[in-house]
Image: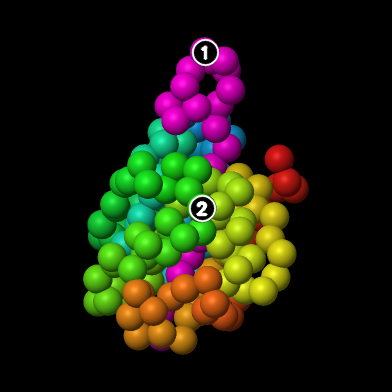
Amino acid sequence: MKTLLLMRHAKSSWSDPARDDHDRPLNKRGERDAPVVARLIADGGWVPDLIVSSSACRARQTALVIAESSAWSADVWLTRRLYLAEPREYLALLAQVPDAASRVLMIGHNPGLEQLASELSGVEWTLPTAALVVFSLDVERWEDVGLDTRAQIVGNHAPRPVD
């Protein structure tokens, strides 16, 4: 049995319209929301063994704020492959996770993250910034998770309506 946590990055800043999208940082709301999600994860007993995050500044900052605010010992993998990735790319990275990790948090972007959550659950998801969905997967190896895998939803959190 594995636990997969999918989280959309926290709210990012649009204050500098000339800044490349990949390089947009969190805004103040994003900096406040990320530790809230970290507490929810800890309270739910879902502290990850590994965090896999997009390398986009807003996703990277979300991952680091979550890890640091909770003093988790989880490794953080940063990869550009999750920047605006499709569901298959999330699964390709997940297949590379060591099976010793029983809980993995993936932090990324819409629309791919919403699509992956919908595929795994059979439920249509709308994930605003800092939203979290937690799935239980009846697999022993991460490489066995595919678009046809049906996951059980064990938790979710959306701090605000869709934005």
Q: Judge whether 158 appears above or below 121 on screen.
A: above
Which image quadrant: the N terminus? bottom left
Of the image marks 2 and 1, the number of the one nearer the N terminus = 1
Residue depicted at 52% across the width and 13% down the height: 18
Element under disc 1? loop
Give the amino acid type for the residue marked by disc 1 in the picture. Ala
First to last magenta residue range: 1-23
The mark lying in front, picked from 2 and 1, is 2
Residue depicted at 50% across the width and 32% down the height: 26
Residue depicted at 41% across the width and 36% down the height: 56
Q: Judge whether 84 appears above or below 6 on screen.
A: above
Magenta residue check for 86: no
Give the amino acid type for the residue marked by disc 2 in the picture. Glu
- Which residue position is annotated with label 1? 18
User: Is residue 56 found left or right of 99 in the rendered image?
Assistant: right
Q: Report x, y in % for residue 131.
A: 60, 54
User: Is residue 148 found left or right of 71 in the rendered image?
Assistant: right
Q: Report x, y in % for residue 127.
A: 65, 53
Residue 100 visible? The answer is: yes
> Residue 86's mark?
2
User: Is residue 124 found left or right of 50 in the rendered image?
Assistant: right
